[in-house]
Amino acid sequence: MEYQSLVYTVDEALANMGFGKFQALVLVYAGLGWFAEATEMMLISFVGSEVKSEWGLSSSEESLLSTVVFAGMLVGAYAWGVVSDNYGRRRGFLGTAVLTSGAGFLSTFSPNYILFLIFRFLVGMGLGSGSVFACWFLEFVPADNRGKWMVVFSSFWTFGTIFEVALAWIVMSRLSWRSLLAFSSLPSFVLLLFYCLAPESPRYLCVKGNTTDAHRILEKIDIQDEEFAPKEEVPLLSSTRKNTEEKRNCMPPVFMLFSSNLTRTTLLLWTFYFGNVFSYYGIILLTSELSSSEGKCGSTTWQSEGLQDASLYIDVFITSLAELPGLLLSAILVDRIGRKLTFIIILTLACIFLLPLAFYQSATLTTALLFGARMCAMGSITVAYIYGPEIYPTSVRTTGIGVADAVGRIGGMICPLVAVGLVTSCHQTAAIILFEVVIVLSAICAFLFPYETKGQELIDTVVVSKSKEAQVVGD
């Protein structure tokens, strides 16, 4: 019975098996979730003016179209994070498939403004489970190249934004804004269609004490990939191994975020996510707002309305392509120099690109600077969705990231007031200075993060002892 002591933890099993076909399928499904979220997030940028015109909305009512989506995401991010930590990752991201596809398609037939807002709020709630996809995929990836594969996962968001810009450019010139809503909901329907094939996270199952199902999933990975073949009598996981530390901790996941060794991490991550989301969507909105306001505030005048509309699609398309080198930059840096230093370098570059926009520049230079700024914003937010899930234990991972994501959505809700309000009021310098301050604050948070996670195994549980000292234990 000597072999019984030779057992594998989840990290050891994944490290020995490497990244194979099974994980590739998980990557595609999780990536499709982010692709669907990106399409729904981008479309309001293109249908807002059409909805305003058809229903005679005011500017504040038009801005509310974006705000309600972020409000829904704020609620959904927290709710699906808690559901995922208590009832499983699969149930957590089921919200995206059901709410986003259903409410997204039904909003196509909205007869009035109020019902349209309700449907878009429900879409936002579905999109709130996007961070669960990141945590779910992360838990299938070996530690050594986790950063690289998480960047590949993040690329699905970028392709979703590029797809939506191209789709809007085609559909809006030939059909109507309602058609764009219908087409944009299709990725979520595909997500729902293949939901039954998505496996539960073996790491989550182990934390919940269900090593039998975890063992079965790991064996399925092993059979498909045929790269790791332990002796038949040596199990991948110990069926008798008990997570006694987890049993000692009866606190709900959301309260564990403020245990003694996680409070600093939680507060810094909230501030960092707020700054990242604020900056990311701010740069997206600056692209359209600087284009549309240049004739009013600057020296350039548009020759025709049609030229202005075409220029908007071109500028948004070009700056969306900037996310690709942003992903490449983060992929190059994240597993070489670590997460924290990558944050600081990328955010510093973002400040450099944005600073000249404090003063009016030519249309070409403005587009080029926004291209560089969006590249850096995408790089930073990509690494944030790597570092955030890594820094939290499995038992509170999706709750922690869900709440942080919700705080980030508050930044997304506030951002339009800056990008739309200040720029359209010809206060471009003030808007850029505010973005610079937010980015610097994010860089300071990155510097203060408690530890580096590059190449480290994921931690599983937070144990609260009788002395109220919390400690993190692995699997």
Image: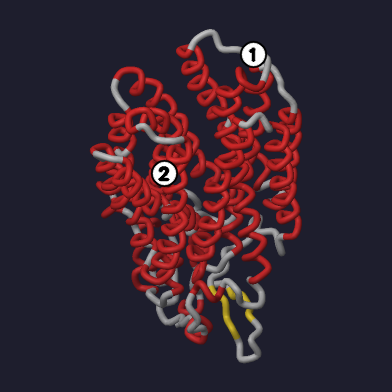
431 in relation to 139, above or below: above
The dot on residue 37 is 2
Q: Where residue 391 appears, x then y in whole percent?
A: 61, 62
Answer left or right for 350 relative to 257: right
Q: Where residue 344 appears, x then y in whole percent?
A: 74, 47
The quarter holding residue 462 reads bottom right
Name the quarter where the N terminus is drawn. Answer: bottom left
Q: Secondary structure at mark 1?
A: loop
The amino acid type found where label 1 is placed reads Thr
Residue drawn where x is 47% and y is 56% of the image: 74
What distance separates the C-alpha of mark 1 from that of mark 2?
35 Å
Residue drawn where x is 68% and y is 42% of the image: 333
Q: Residue furthest bottom?
A: 466
Residue drawn where x is 43% and y is 44% of the image: 34
Nearest the camera: 464 or 300? Answer: 300
Answer left or right for 456 relative to 352: left
The amino acid type found where label 2 is placed reads Glu
The residue labelled by disc 1 is 300
The number of numbered badges drawn on the structure is 2
Q: Where residue 152 appears, x then y in whole percent?
A: 52, 41
Q: Residue furthest top?
A: 303
Nearest the camera: 403 or 159? Answer: 403
